[in-house]
Image (spheres, rainbow, N blue to C red):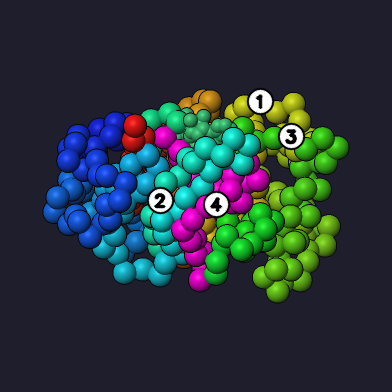
Amino acid sequence: MPLSLPLHSPLPNTSLFLPLSSHPPNFTLSTLPTINLHRRRRINHHHRSLTTTTTIRASVIQYDTTQQQPLLQVNDLKAKIVENGVEILHGVNLTVNQGEVHAIMGKNGSGKSTFAKVLVGHPEYEVTGGSVVFKGENLLDMEPEERSLAGLFMSFQSPVAIPGVSNDEFLVMAYNARRRKLGLPELGPLECFSYLMEKLKLVNMKPDFLNRNVNEGFSGGERKRNEILQLAVLGADLAILDEIDSGLDVDALRDVANAVNQLLTPKNSLLMITHYRRLLDLLKPTHVHVMVSYK
Ligand SMILES: Nc1ncnc2c1ncn2[C@@H]1O[C@H](COP(=O)(O)OP(=O)(O)OP(=O)(O)O)[C@@H](O)[C@H]1O
């Protein structure tokens, strides 16, 4: 069923653009448009209503009526750019429960990528206020690597190359580190090989990708596909995909969406940033948030 709200634009109701000091209790769900959403097979609800969110200069206000286990709880998160001290996030609130698929949309420069990068501990940003709880733990106290080992995964808009490290070396190293963290024994070379082959198939990638250095010489689309391979291999409780659809041709987009859909379970969640409806049609979000710059 198509969404009735033009998802690429801010909410039409200007009364929703709140002053920065406003909090969700000022609003009730009935003041917001409720949209019938695609039925998701993995959730046993025949009908879900879409929770619409508005953001003021990167302040997300969310209306959540679900009762599932919270995976990520962001409360009044504020962050600035380290280099110039400019505050980009002015108090973001967001809750992602297990089994949910959230999409963040909004204009260029509204702070979507900054928000995602702050969640994974990107060194360009400094958190100046608020809290982030991930799986019951204070995420902001963790180093970026610990966040990843704890089950947070992010695909970047422009994933970087790692010269001199082959894809399979990287994946085996990262996967075994995650297994250790989960208290599981490391996989040996043969077990790893068959595990990686299975994941390559899921993403519809050729085995020769494993021998190439991570992202070195990869086309834009290959880099994006490779990000999903990393997600498939490492697994994640919360996967953040930042514009995974940009620059992908039709076949690659379908492969990426198929793989992501197969990786989703009622226990894990997805937070995707996108400008395009076509990804929403393929990944069927349970919640859509619109980030709006307040000037
Ligand atoms: N490291 C940085 N140095 C300087 N400015 C930055 C930095 N990171 C973010 N910004 C600025 O912060 C604002 C938000 O950027 P961000 O990339 O988060 O926006 P976005 O909503 O993801 O945009 P887009 O849709 O274009 O990807 C922009 O004005 C951007 O120029």
Q: Which residue is mark 2?
A: 91
Quadrant placement of the C terminus: top left
Which comes before the other along the chain, label 4 or label 2? Answer: 2
Answer left or right for 167 relative to 274: right
Q: Which residue is mark 4?
A: 127
Mark 3 belongs to which amino acid?
Ala
Answer left or right for 145 relative to 70: right
* C-beta proximity under 8 Å, tags 2 and 1: no
Viewer-nearest of labels 4 and 1?
Answer: 4
Q: How many marks?
A: 4
Q: Residue at x 49, y 45 (%)?
A: 115
Q: Which residue is mark 3?
A: 161
Answer left or right for 141 relative to 108: right
Please say if 63 is above or below 57.
Answer: below
Asked if one can make out residue 249 in the rendered structure from this viewpoint, the answer is yes
Mark 4 belongs to which amino acid?
Val
Residue furthest toward the front? Answer: 85
C-alpha span from label 4 to label 2: 11 Å
C-alpha span from label 2 to label 3: 33 Å
Q: Which residue is mark 1?
A: 219
Q: Secondary structure at mark 4?
A: strand
Q: Secondary structure at mark 2?
A: strand
Mark 2 belongs to which amino acid?
Gly
Q: Is 99 a magenta residue?
A: no
Range shown magenta: 110-136
Depth check, front residue: 125 or 206: 125
Residue 63 is situated, as x and y percent measured from the top left of the image, at 27, 56
Q: Residues within 10 Å of mark 1 (few under 14, many from 20)?
A: few
